[in-house]
Image (cartoon, helix red, strand yellow):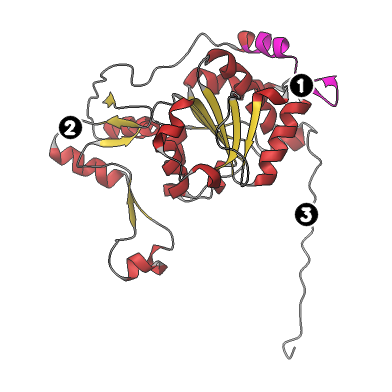
Amino acid sequence: LSKKNEVYVRVETEPNIARELSDFFTFEVPGARFMPTYKKRIWDGKIRLYNQMNGEVYLGLIPYIQEFAKLNDIDIEYKGDVNATQSSFTHGVCKGFIRNIKPKSNGKSIELRDYQTDAVVHAIRNNRSLLLSPTASGKSLIIYSLIRYYNLLLKDKKILILVPTTSLVEQMYSDFIDYGWKDKYVHRIYSGHERTTDKPVIVSTWQSLYKMDKKYFKDFGCVIGDEAHLFKSKSLTSILTKLDDCKYRFGLTGTLDGTQTHRLVLEGLFGSVNKVTSTKELMDRKTLANLNIKCIVLKHPQEN
């Protein structure tokens, strides 16, 4: 395995193993048989994440390659820093950093909950991750902690935050201002807004940027996708493959849609899934209100 860039890893192997690996990373797309390209027999309804022609596969899928190698008793040789991590960023360092940036909410100081600290530590240590964190678990505070850290680390590079809707752009912006950051650091992009800016952090809808030229993305050193499960695969891959110099990449989502292709595309582009917490855990801690579900079953007479 050798790293091509921040998007792809190159697999050099003999042809029969390459074929098996291609099968391992081939999936049927749910509902493909209803699509025009399938009906016209232009496409077979499958997604292939491993390209047999050039041996490339998403960098975030290395754990799956390792799993494949283990199952088939194959040795892997690594060239260069294929999987570099930062073990020096500990919980203690993280807590000290959060104390320094002093996040606030409604003017009062706030502390990260233990699972939020775990999420930030995991993300920074691994340089990339897909964080699974449910609604009301405080995702925007996790994102704020990450952008403050990478704003200090990346002196000459910008940070890109991608969200699915304009209301989320505004919500993210107002959260950052509430936490104590200033407008001069954060630029918003959606229809009618300028796409170029000197501000270090850009919050944008992915619809505003997916048609942009590759050179536009050269300035970014870190990308964060919020509500990552709502991104259309094509638009998301379009943006994240153009960010081939962008080392730090994090996706946050409350849910994965259950299809293996969708999950593997997200993991391939952002990194392995890390479950931050669950709705049940938040209820047990009394962070969320308890949910009471009452099922009403109506029985109608046969003649009705």
Under tag 2, what secondary structure?
A: loop
Instruction: Identify the mark nearer the N-term, 1 or 3.
Output: 1
Residue range corresponding to the magenta coloring: 94-110
Q: Could you say which quadrant of the image residue 57 lies in?
A: top left
Above or below, 39 relative to 196: below
The residue under the point 58% across, 18% down is 151
> Which three-letter amino acid code belongs to the residue tagged 1?
Gly
> Alpha-carbon distance for marks 3 and 2?
53 Å
Mark 2, residue position: 13
| Circle on res. 180 | 1
Give residue 252's position: percent from left, percent from top.
58, 36
Mark 3, residue position: 293
Mark 1 or 3, closer to the camera: 1
> Which three-letter amino acid code belongs to the residue tagged 2?
Thr
User: Could you tell whether 221 is left or right of 94 in the image?
Assistant: left
102 is within the stretch colored magenta: yes
User: Is residue 279 something one can see in this rendering?
Assistant: no
Q: Within 10 Å of the Cα at label 1, are there few (<14), some (14-19), or many (20+) other Cα atoms?
A: some
Above or below, 157 relative to 228: above
The residue under the point 34% across, 60% down is 45
For the N terminus, which image quadrant? top left
User: Is residue 41 something one can see in this rendering?
Assistant: yes
Q: Within 10 Å of the Cα at label 2, are there few (<14), some (14-19), or many (20+) other Cα atoms?
A: few
Give residue 248's position: percent from left, percent from top.
48, 24
